[in-house]
Amino acid sequence: MKNEPVRIAHVIGKDVHGGLEAIVMDYYRNIDRSKIQYDFLIDEDSTSTFMKDEIPGLGGRVIMIPPYQKQFKYQKVLHKLFTENHYPLVYSHLNTLSVFPLFAAWRAGIPIRIAHNHSTAGKGELMKNVMKYSLRPFAKLFPTHLCACSRLAGEWLFGKRAMNSGRVTIWQNAINVSKFAYDEDVRKDVRRELNLSDKFVVGHAGRFIHQKNHDFLIDIFMEIHKRRSDSVLLLAGNGPLMETMIEKVNCMGINDCVKFLGSVSSMERYYQAMDIFILPSFYEGLPVVGSEVQVSGLPFLCSDAVTSETKFCENLHFMSLSKNAGEWAEEALKMSEPYAEICRKKQSNTALISKHRPRR
């Protein structure tokens, strides 16, 4: 029908309520949905219903598909779906795995096929890296357009030649800045809810997977706790290594000062309660939390394995993973003292935050 919006297929993969899902949903909420609508293709073995719960109310459709591991069934379902719906565009967010849905889109004759890379690779993930490096040579085979969240992510998947030729569009993760602006009242409310009113709060948000380096994060917190007995660690997120980290915390005897929040839908509220945010990741494409934390004005200590493109405010400091947990702890405590107040005052003078009250 003439007045029907154009429908675009977005291949998400598994909904795990992570940064990818958050950023795609932010874009979706802010487009003109009377002209463009999204069909979200989500793996049927997803562990979260974050996207499925909201999308139908916005006029979008959630289509559950087999996981890519069931390749024969996956290709059959996608080919039929793409052929029957006559999508003008298929947009894949699966990084190296985009070769699979975009192959199906190519076979179905979809004219515009976009591959968007959100990640890179790091040490310690042998099987995952075997898959990534095996598929990387095919990354440019089926898409008509290439995108990445950072130059580092673009170069890693598509190569320097593609980057330098201008073939890769860098689409850095955008957020709603007003949503993350500091609010003293919210800080007090959340700290009261979590019994943190008189605590020094260290925070982190991320899936419990090897990439995020929770093992080292807990070691850092242990060193902080030795120096400040009033410290508490907030960990937001779920994932396959969560139980392992809970066991580690119990064995270290700090279970009474580490809070596992699980999947959080309003992360902006929890940033307000923190005194410092630590991200010791082994690798990232361009972390969404990086933008969120900087806009909140929260002191932010980040691994230097994360791309320097992450930094746009003075409240972020990079630190090498070659430094030990004690050195990270010392830096975190140093940043959280007078520097926190300086950051907030400087932050209030930027165009990023229009309304701001300094942290007390």
Image (cartoon, rainbow, N blue to C red):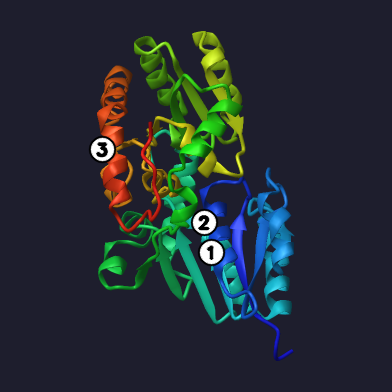
The amino acid on which the numbered mark 3 sits, given as a three-letter code, is Ile
Which quadrant holds the N terminus? bottom right
Q: Quadrant of residue 315?
A: top left
CB of mark 3 within 8 Å of CB of mark 1? no
* Separation of marks 2 and 3 at Cα, in angstroms: 29 Å
Image spot of residue 32 (x, y percent): 58, 75
Horizontal side, residue 318 vs residue 177: left or right: left
Give the SS element for disc 2: helix
> How many residues crowd around disc 1 within 10 Å: few (fewer than 14), some, or many (20 or more)?
few
Q: Is residue 235 above or below residue 294?
A: above
Horizontal side, residue 345 vs residue 174: left or right: left
The amino acid on which the numbered mark 1 sits, given as a three-letter code, is Tyr
Horizontal side, residue 341 vs residue 192: left or right: left
Q: Quadrant of residue 25?
A: bottom right
* Separation of marks 3 and 1 at Cα, in angstroms: 32 Å
The mark found on residue 23 in the picture is: 2
The mark found on residue 342 in the picture is: 3
CB of mark 2 within 8 Å of CB of mark 3? no
Q: Nearer the viewer, residue 350 or 130?
A: 350
Kindly identify the residue that appears in the image at 51 percent across and 27 percent down.
234
Dot placed on the residue nearer the N-terminal end, 3 or 1: 1
Kindly identify the residue that appears in the image at 37 percent across and 33 percent down.
280
CB of mark 2 within 8 Å of CB of mark 1? yes
The mark found on residue 27 in the picture is: 1
Dot placed on the residue nearer the N-terminal end, 2 or 3: 2
Which quadrant holds the C terminus? top left
Q: Is residue 42 above or below residue 185?
A: below
* Separation of marks 2 and 1 at Cα, in angstroms: 6 Å
The amino acid on which the numbered mark 2 sits, given as a three-letter code, is Ile
> How many residues crowd around disc 2 within 10 Å: few (fewer than 14), some, or many (20 or more)?
some
Q: Is residue 324 visible?
A: yes
